[in-house]
Image (cartoon, coloured by chain):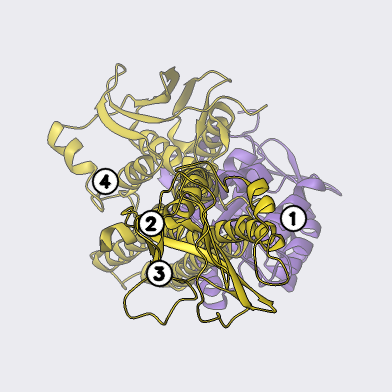
Amino acid sequence: MKGVLNSIRARLLISGVLFTVVAVVLAALTIRPTLDQFVRRNVDASLESQISVLARAVKSDGSLDQDRIQSVGPFIRRGAGWAWVVKGPAGVLRSQTVAAVEPRQGEGPPPWPRPERDRDRDRMPQREMRPDKPPTAPLKESRRWRSRSGWNESFYFRTLTISTSRGPVTVTAGAPRYIRDRMRDEGLRPLLLSLGVLGVGLLAAMIGQLELGLRPLRKLGASLAAVRAGEQRRIDDKQPRELEPVVAELNALLDHNDQALAKARSHVSNLAHGLKTPLATLAVRLAEPGRDPDGSLASLIAQIDGAIGHHLGRARAASPGAPGRPALPVRSRLDDLVAALSRIHAAAGVRAELDVADDLYVACDPQDFDEMTGNLLDNAWKFAERTVRVTGRRQGARVVLDIDDDGPGLTDEAAAAALVPGSRLDERGAGHGFGLSIALELAELHDGALTLGRAPIGGLRVTLALPARSAEP
Amino acid sequence: MRILLVEDDAPLAESIAQALREEQFAVDIAADGETGAHLGSTETYAAAVLDLGLPKQDGLSVLRGWRAQNRPLPVLILTARYGWTEKVEGFKAGADDYLTKPFRVEELVMRLRALVRRSAGHHGPRIVCGRLTFDAQMGGFEFDGMPLKLTSFEWRVLSCLILRKEVVVERMDILEQAYEGDAGGDSNSLEVIVGRLRRKIGHEMIETVRGRGYRLTAGAA
């Protein structure tokens, strides 16, 4: 149950079903007495109209106008169970349908005479007036009676007492309870049916409502996932009013994270750059004659510098702060880098050959791209004899760049070791050995890959694959 | 060869200046971007070493300013910012070389020498003028195949002449390359130095062009 209640959908559904069922059952329960009352009023009206017709036949001296009684006719179809009794000083007159009625045991004395058992029921009306005690109430509500005829059911009746010169005359009309029940049930059945339909309809509406109401939540989840995947930077602001505060908070949190990240990066970067200037001073001072005869101190400085560079690179690589990566034109980026490297390594006399089409684009942060290809090209330049060659092509969903040099290349073990973070292939170079592993980390961060192989022109081939992008319009 | 060093960190600037002076360079130090920009625009230097993170005016804008004025001054950027994007930015702004801190002094010296040599239009590291050879990479002079011993001033004047061999070099240009800042010598002191050089490499190699300056020449021989 706890697991079920963990879902908003289940909570809403369960509570909805519960409330609907309770409401429908309560409605069904209230309908019954209401309908009872309604039916009784109907029966009352029928009985009273019968009574008033009979009362008109009561003369002022208490006797009954036989002709009038005759004109009333049978109260209700024979056998339907409706009945009347007029009792006065002149005797008792009954409808043909009721032979006699008697009060239930224990109830007060009824204003009713004891009925005669042997009365012929087919004759109508019958005359059988006997003196009796007068009834008290002018119009009395129901009492339970049982028919004498052996129908064995409760009776519902109304009584009117008329004062005459010779004493009170009571006019009573009754209907068996089953009639009332039947009328009530006839009304109840369609009502309950429509209540049931209403309940089912409500449940269906609720499910639809849940579907519709929870859709924004699902969209919000997808939007958050897209932020995490780096496809978008913030969550879309266009949300239902109820979700707006949540989205605003989430976006504020994302912004805060971005800021904290930028701050942390800038701290790392400031620390690194702050260290580099005194480190440079130290290196220059150590270079003065006699200060560092065996070069061990200089190599310590190179080590410190390497560590700074490595962790600076990692701080950058550990945080893909570039959602919605732009389509980066590979060729122009490489042209800039090659121009820079040609100057940096001007003395080496290495020639760069670029075979990269203008229409290749990658999904990559520009600085990360520069860092990867810059490091790889720099390595190639350092080891190349004469030529560095870069070829680029589209291969499925990726852009593949081969960076070749015609240097000595690497043995398989050296190639494997080269990709281990912090390894240095060239101990002589000052802090440049981290290039390959940083390039590898960055490539993986951008869903790319980096592999080492043998270049057709003799040296090392580094193959960098990055997700391709079509050009932005 | 006079170098403009624009670096705001005083200890580093002093250390670099000292190391460069030991390699015979004359060095002017500017401690902020504005001073650096002004010196680079008004004085003649063989090359500039430019830090990027500078007070008052950052290094890149100093460099762009020089390039906008068409100053041909070779510029080596020396910075703690080591990212490739920053390097590319630097080269796009007009830098000729780039070195990240920390660096080895020999590398800085080598790069500066190479910059100066290339900016004078020499492609190979050895510049030959008659019996005189200048190893522009290592900074040494040879005369008849033997190392030539020179004082700093002599070296600066001779390197200035050999980089522009067979061409008349104005007196002012030579003086600017030989003396730091306002310490500037005068024509007389230059004549003294030239006289000493003539004694070492032969009178005929340095011609005096009256009213203008001097010319290093292999001569008719």
Cα separation, mark 4 vs mark 2, equals 69 Å
Cα separation, mark 3 vs mark 4, equals 130 Å
Q: Nearer the viewer, residue A88 or A243?
A: A88
Cα separation, mark 2 vs mark 1, equals 87 Å
Badge number at residue A171: none
Quadrant where the image shows the N terminus of chain B: bottom right
Question: Do the residues marked 4 and 1 share a common chain?
Answer: no
Query: Is label 2 or label 1 in front?
Result: 2
Residue drawn at x 44%, y 54% is A98
Q: Colour of chain B?
A: purple
Q: Nearer the viewer, residue A430 or A91?
A: A91
Q: Earlier in the sequence, mark 3 or mark 2?
A: 2
Residue that mark 3 sits on: A114
Q: What residue type is disc 3 on?
A: Arg
Cα separation, mark 3 vs mark 2, equals 61 Å
Residue drawn at x 47%, y 21% is A353
Residue that mark 2 sits on: A14
Query: Is label 1 or label 3 in front?
Result: 3
Badge number at residue A426: 4
